[in-house]
Image (cartoon, grey):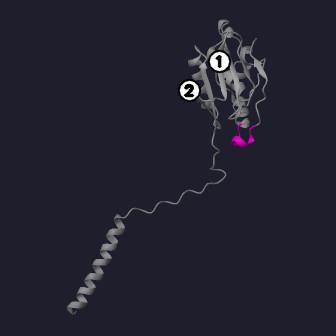
Amino acid sequence: MPHSSWLKAAGAAFAVALATATAAHAAPAPAPAPELTAATSVAAAVTLHYDDSRAGGWEAAIAAGVASWNRNVSNVRLVEAAPGTRAEIQIVATSGWPQATLGPVRPGGQVRVELGNQAVSEGYDKTRIATHEMGHSLGLPDTKPGPCSQLMSGSAAGTSCTNAVPNATERSRVESAYAGGLASLVPADGRTLVDAP
């Protein structure tokens, strides 16, 4: 083989080896994004802000109530409002019976929850009260009389009841009220429900 042919063959072999080595160390091509279907697409949860800055003495009960709702429903989220910002759910401590505006409240709307100390002085559980009254904000009416297993039975379940977890029916009603995100939300009912025995 003549010298020039040998050089051409060696150069071609070197070029092939270099291309192969470079390809082996090159970053892999990004994987294509998974295709979203109706089954895999999930609507973003509706975020509702609450302001408990005027609910002194109820902070732990409110935090437990918020955690209960956030654990048990997926298409609505309760989040504490930053100081000085508008909140959809205004929570205040009062000396009377607990009461709340019946929702479902929409983002930009506003409802009021009054956590009444009279119920506490009569032996009712603070966390159950707070969670129950937030349930009104989310559109749940009272279900009186009712057993302790129904959060929305409120005071009808008696002072020994400490259940602060919505049952399957209550969870389903809230999920239904907030299904489809913001577009499907109707305005809050607006009635004030007083939870006295």
The magenta-colored residue range is 178-185
Side of 81 relative to 99 (left or right):
left
Q: Is residue 163 visible?
A: no
Side of 190 relative to 81 (left or right):
right
- Which residue position holds label 2? 83
Whether residue 182 appears in magenta in the rendering, the answer is yes
Q: In which quarter of the image is residue 14?
A: bottom left
- Which residue position holds label 1? 92
Give the amino acid type for the residue marked by disc 2 in the picture: Pro
Q: Is residue 192 above or below residue 24?
A: above
Q: Is residue 195 above or below residue 4?
A: above
Q: What is the C-alpha distance between the residues marked 2 and 1?
A: 15 Å
Nearest to viewer (mark 2 / mark 1): 2
Q: Position of residue 153 (x, y in %)?
A: 74, 19
Question: Which residue ends up furthest to the left in the rendered image?
Answer: 3
Q: Where is residue 29 in the image (x, y as percent from the top left)?
A: 45, 63
Tell which of 126 and 172 is nearer to you: 126
| Residue pictured at 65% horizontal, 6% vertical | 121
Q: Position of residue 163 (x, y in %)?
A: 65, 19
Q: In which quarter of the image is residue 54?
A: top right
Q: Can residue 89 be seen in this view?
A: yes
Question: Which residue ends up furthest to the bottom in the rendered image?
Answer: 2
Q: Is residue 70 above or below residue 115?
A: below
| Residue pictured at 70% horizontal, 23% vertical | 112
**Quadrant in which the N terminus appears:** bottom left
Mark 1, secondary structure of its residue: strand
| Residue pictured at 72% horizontal, 21% vertical | 100
Q: Position of residue 101 (x, y in %)?
A: 74, 23
